[in-house]
Image (cartoon, rainbow, N blue to C red):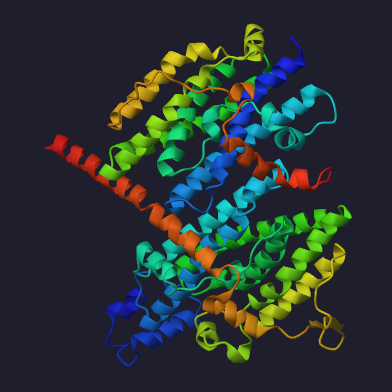
């Protein structure tokens, strides 16, 4: 196993927290009320904080002059390894919460395994993240229940988001070649083993929220291999704007 | 009113409630929500505290505009945390305002219909990253000068909220100045970006301290109630005296050809402020008045079904618990 395998493995985790953090931060100042606005921003801050720890570690592993900012801002779209789910746009609050919920359940299961990684840095980042992500999962599950079992309108909107975003859930368990190598070296997590627990938890919450679990067997994937949706380019053009327009400067 | 005064109304008969109230304020006692207060005091406080709360949440928008485009991870996280602090300030201030017997919905309604004002400075656009520095340094700097005296204002809930707000604001101001400093010591493009931001934000920041004393309608009453300790012109002078040396330190030029140190007064003399511009923006004709207000109205309207869902869900849960109890 080479460092490059671990680096690619880390991108598969950290690009998710970066892109989801970016999506959530677009909402800052536009939430349905102040309390929710603050809570969503808190989650964005947690996710971006985790991203920084991962990228700083990648910078260290890559052994050249790279910084966390080069990694965050100066890769081309094909080099980002986040799942399609997290790049989906903030169409309405129902989408924001469902996207968050679908990711949080996976994220928590992942970190609970990653904390036992033989790589001490990854284990430490995971341990710290578990506290934060447990809160995220509680927040998004509670909101799924409120929206699903709230009013007729909120039920309809939540169901629409669940139906629409369901097709992106399977990719969470996709193992790339790098993932497999890193897992075999006891550094990475075998995400396939998380699948059953994941869908069980998701089902429980959706059922409590009186939402129906989609039956579709057609799933979309690509992000983990660097093939993204059309939304990704626009997200990156915002994210990378300053670094592209003013290269090689200190901020 | 103190307990003694309530128990012995006879001895105090000659003194009206209002006189007692005025004396309490003169003794620097805090007025609390359940205390008697003149209607005018209540109304003035609702107006000022809500205006302040609205400024915090409208103020999230110009800076929020750069969160997704911040130039580094460190800056992105810091800016996000800063804008979140402003939401927090809005929350304490709305809560303080609600203690005066008005609901958050009514306060929002006043903002959305244009009945309540917010600080005009937020009606200017943030066109470059350097604006994040200029806003922190100048706008938060001017806000602190306005707000520090409020930590000892007469209305208890407002004074307590302001203690926390001021602590965070002074952190924001240092953060803004640090952004500017970094730009000013950067490449020629970065320095030009910083100077351009200073040019655009300087005069609106001076206007932020309010109309000149001759034009200020609320000053006298506000001084009495300790909502104000210094006049607008005094505060403006303090801001200029404090900020000019900071600009000198980082090698940026204040865009005022008449700016000059006056040995006699030991203050800076400065050029004429364009008050026409100020009143135009206050009246709704600034570059972003429409955008700011419609962003707030949209967030509120698009959030309605979410708030309704939360209410409906919480009622269902309570009903379930009641049923179980029966």
Residue B323 is situated, as x and y percent measured from the top left of the image, at 14, 37
Residue A85 is situated, as x and y percent measured from the top left of the image, at 51, 30
Q: How many marks?
A: 0
- The residue closer to the viewer here, B316 or B155, is B316
Relative side of A40 to B213, left or right = left
- The residue closer to the viewer here, A196 or B216, is A196
Residue A152 is situated, as x and y percent measured from the top left of the image, at 26, 43
Residue at image x 52%, y 21%? Answer: A172
* Res A53 quadrant in image: top right
Which quadrant is home to the N terminus of chain A? top right
Relative to A232, residue A83 above or below: above
Relative to B27, residue B179 above or below: above
- The residue closer to the viewer here, A102 or B97, is A102
Residue at image x 54%, y 84%? Answer: B223
Q: Is residue B306 visible?
A: yes
Relative side of A99 to B2, left or right = right
* Res B74 quadrant in image: top right
Relative to A66, residue B259 above or below: below
Residue A184 is situated, as x and y percent measured from the top left of the image, at 64, 6
Q: Is residue A47 visible?
A: no
Relative side of B61 to A56, left or right = left
Residue at image x 71%, y 69%? Answer: B201
- The residue closer to the viewer here, B29 or B313, is B313
Outermost left residue: B326
* Res B107 quadrant in image: bottom left
Outermost top residue: A184
Residue at image x 78%, y 26%? Answer: A60
């Amino acid at each position: 196993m080479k460092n490059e395998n671990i680096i690619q493995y880390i991108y598969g985790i950290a690009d998710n927290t970066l892109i989801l953090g970016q999506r959530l931060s677009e909402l800052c100042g536009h939430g349905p009320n102040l309390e929710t606005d603050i809570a969503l921003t808190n989650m964005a801050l947690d996710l971006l904080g985790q991203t920084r720890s991962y990228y700083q570690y990648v910078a260290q592993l890559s052994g050249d002059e790279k910084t966390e900012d080069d990694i965050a801002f100066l890769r081309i779209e094909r080099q980002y390894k986040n799942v399609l789910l997290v790049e989906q746009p903030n169409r309405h609050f129902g989408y924001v919460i469902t996207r968050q919920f679908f990711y949080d359940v996976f994220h928590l299961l992942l970190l609970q395994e990653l904390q036992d990684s033989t790589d001490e840095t990854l284990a430490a980042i995971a341990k710290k993240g578990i506290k934060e992500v447990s809160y995220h999962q509680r927040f998004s599950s509670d909101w799924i229940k409120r929206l699903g079992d709230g009013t007729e309108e909120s039920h309809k909107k939540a169901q629409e988001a669940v139906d629409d975003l369901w097709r992106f859930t399977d990719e969470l368990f996709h193992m790339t070649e790098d993932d497999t190598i890193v897992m075999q070296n006891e550094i990475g997590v075998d995400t396939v083993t998380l699948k059953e627990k994941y869908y069980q938890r998701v089902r429980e919450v959706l059922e409590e929220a009186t939402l129906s679990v989609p039956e579709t067997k057609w799933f979309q994937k690509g992000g983990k291999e660097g093939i993204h949706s059309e939304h990704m380019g626009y997200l990156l053009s915002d994210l990378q704007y300053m670094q592209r327009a003013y290269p090689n400067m200190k901020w | 009113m103190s307990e003694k005064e309530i128990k012995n109304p006879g001895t105090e008969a000659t003194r009206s409630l209002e006189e007692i109230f005025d004396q309490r304020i003169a003794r620097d006692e805090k007025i609390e929500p359940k205390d008697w207060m003149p209607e005018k005091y209540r109304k003035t406080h609702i107006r000022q505290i809500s205006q302040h709360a609205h400024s915090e949440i409208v103020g999230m928008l110009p800076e929020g505009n750069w969160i997704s485009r911040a130039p580094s991870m460190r800056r992105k996280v810091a800016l996000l945390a800063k804008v979140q602090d402003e939401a927090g300030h809005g929350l304490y201030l709305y809560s303080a305002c609600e203690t005066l017997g008005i609901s958050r919905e009514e306060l929002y309604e006043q903002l959305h219909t244009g009945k309540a004002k917010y600080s005009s400075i937020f009606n200017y656009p943030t066109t470059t990253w350097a604006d994040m520095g200029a806003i922190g340094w100048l706008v938060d700097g001017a806000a602190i000068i306005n707000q520090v005296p409020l930590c000892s204002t007469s209305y208890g809930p407002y004074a307590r909220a302001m203690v926390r707000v001021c602590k965070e604001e002074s952190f924001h101001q240092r953060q803004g100045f640090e952004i500017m400093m970094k730009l000013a010591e950067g490449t020629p493009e970065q320095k030009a970006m910083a100077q351009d931001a200073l040019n655009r934000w300087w005069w609106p920041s001076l206007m932020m301290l309010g109309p000149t004393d001759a034009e200020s309608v609320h000053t006298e009453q506000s001084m009495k109630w300790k909502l104000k300790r210094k006049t607008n012109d005094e505060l403006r002078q303090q801001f200029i005296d404090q900020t000019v040396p900071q600009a000198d330190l980082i090698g940026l030029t204040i865009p005022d050809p008449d700016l000059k140190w006056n040995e006699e007064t030991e203050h800076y003399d400065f050029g004429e402020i364009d008050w026409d511009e100020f009143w135009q923006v206050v009246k709704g004709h600034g570059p972003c008045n429409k955008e700011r207000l419609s962003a707030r109205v949209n967030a509120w309207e698009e959030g309605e079904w979410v708030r309704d869902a939360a209410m409906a869900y919480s009622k269902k849960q309570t009903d379930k618990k009641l049923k179980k109890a029966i």
